């Protein structure tokens, strides 16, 4: 392997032109929501997601506790219709004060 064939894996690969790839909407969009472990955390996440995707199927989500059970990770897939919808969803999730990270 030559030095030219190596790339820094910390840097995302970009297509020619240097622009990040665009998402084609509508699409199924997976997200992970991380917050403090509480009995109602999953319900709060589902309520917010339902406001932004009325067709969201809560049966498809996965809930994973952290090693020490201090945090919960809620993984779900929603139907994204555009960047404005995703931004509003992420903003509302963060505004709950219970969400630490949305990936």
Image (spheres, rainbow, N blue to C red):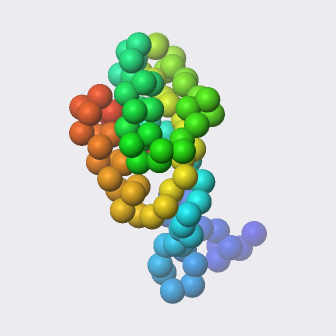
Q: Is residue 29 left or right of residue 2?
A: left
> Residue lying farthest front?
54
Q: Is residue 101 visible?
A: no
In this orientation, which residue lies closer to the viewer: 81 or 87?
A: 81
In this orientation, which residue lies closer to the viewer: 18 or 35?
A: 35
Q: Which residue does the image show at 37% across and 27% down from the upper left? A: 44
Q: Which residue does the image show at 47% across and 47% down from the upper left? A: 53
Instruction: Find residue 23 and report its image quarter.
Output: bottom right
Instruction: Find residue 9 and report its image quarter.
Output: bottom right
In this orientation, which residue lies closer to the viewer: 41 or 16?
A: 41
Q: Is residue 1 left or right of residue 24?
A: right
| Residue 95 locus on image (x, y percent) | 24, 39
Instruction: Find residue 98 and report its image quarter.
Output: top left
> Residue lying farthest right?
1
| Residue 4 locus on image (x, y percent) | 64, 77
Q: Which residue does the image show at 51% across and 56% down from the upper left? A: 80
The vertical placement of 51 against 5, above or below, is above
Q: Which residue does the image show at 60% across and 54% down from the upper left? A: 28
The vertical placement of 33 against 2, above or below, is above
Q: Quadrant of the N terminus?
A: bottom right
| Residue 96 locus on image (x, y percent) | 26, 33
In this orientation, which residue lies closer to the viewer: 33 or 67?
A: 33
Q: How many marks?
A: 0
């Amino acid at each position: 392997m030559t030095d030219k064939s190596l790339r820094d894996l910390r840097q995302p690969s970009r297509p020619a032109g240097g622009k990040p790839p665009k998402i084609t909407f509508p699409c199924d969009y997976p997200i992970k929501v991380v917050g403090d472990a509480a009995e109602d955390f999953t319900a709060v996440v589902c309520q917010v997601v339902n406001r932004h995707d009325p067709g969201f199927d809560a049966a498809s989500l996965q809930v994973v506790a952290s090693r020490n059970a201090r945090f919960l990770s809620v993984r779900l897939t929603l139907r994204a219709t555009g960047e404005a919808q995703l931004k509003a969803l992420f903003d509302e999730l963060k505004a709950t004060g219970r969400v630490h990270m949305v990936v």
